[in-house]
Image: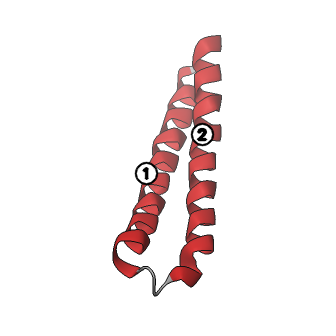
Amino acid sequence: MNPEELKKLEKEVKKNKRLANEQASVLHDLIEDRLPDAYGEIMGIAQATYDACKAWDEANQKLIAAQAAA
């Protein structure tokens, strides 16, 4: 893998980590500020948080593998 491709993967990992952190913040705000009234939102926000963290993990695993192969 060339250096440009590694930089692209690193950028993707950073972007996905930022998105996961933003989604975790939404979940945190729900828990801290809006429960129990907004309990109906738990499943949707939790799923979105899970999906964002999974996307980060998948991108991170690709980066780790690419770095090990380089």
Q: Is residue 24 visible?
A: yes
Nearest the viewer among 39 and 24 is: 39
User: Which of the 4 quarters of the picture holds residue 41?
Assistant: bottom right
- In this rendering, the answer to whether 9 lies above or below 21 is above
Whether label 1 touches label 2, CB < 8 Å: no
Tell me where residue 28 appears, x and y as whole percent.
40, 64
Tell me where residue 15 appears, x and y as whole percent.
48, 48
* Mark toward the start of the polypeptide (1 vs 2): 1
Mark 1 vs mark 2, foreground winner is 2
Quarter of the image that includes the C terminus:
top right
Nearest the viewer among 51 and 27 is: 27
User: Which of the 4 quarters of the picture holds residue 42?
Assistant: bottom right
Disc 2 residue type (three-letter):
Asp
Give the mark count: 2
Q: Which mark is residue 40?
A: none
Taking the spot 57% from the left edge, 18% from the top edge, the residue there is: 67
Tell me where residue 60 appears, x and y as whole percent.
57, 34
Q: Which mark is residue 57?
A: 2
Quarter of the image that includes the N terminus:
top right
The single residue placed furthest to the left in the displayed view is 33
Nearest the viewer among 12 and 46 is: 46
Image-based side of 4 in relation to 35, left or right = right
Taking the spot 63% from the left edge, 56% from the top edge, the residue there is: 51
CA distance separating discs 1 and 2? 12 Å
- In this rendering, the answer to whether 52 lies above or below 57 is below
The single residue placed furthest to the front in the displayed view is 36
- In this rendering, the answer to whether 21 lies above or below 40 is above
Disc 1 residue type (three-letter):
Arg
Nearest the viewer among 55 and 49 is: 49
SS state under label 2 = helix
- What residue is pinned by disc 1? 18
Taking the spot 60% from the left edge, 56% from the top edge, the residue there is: 50
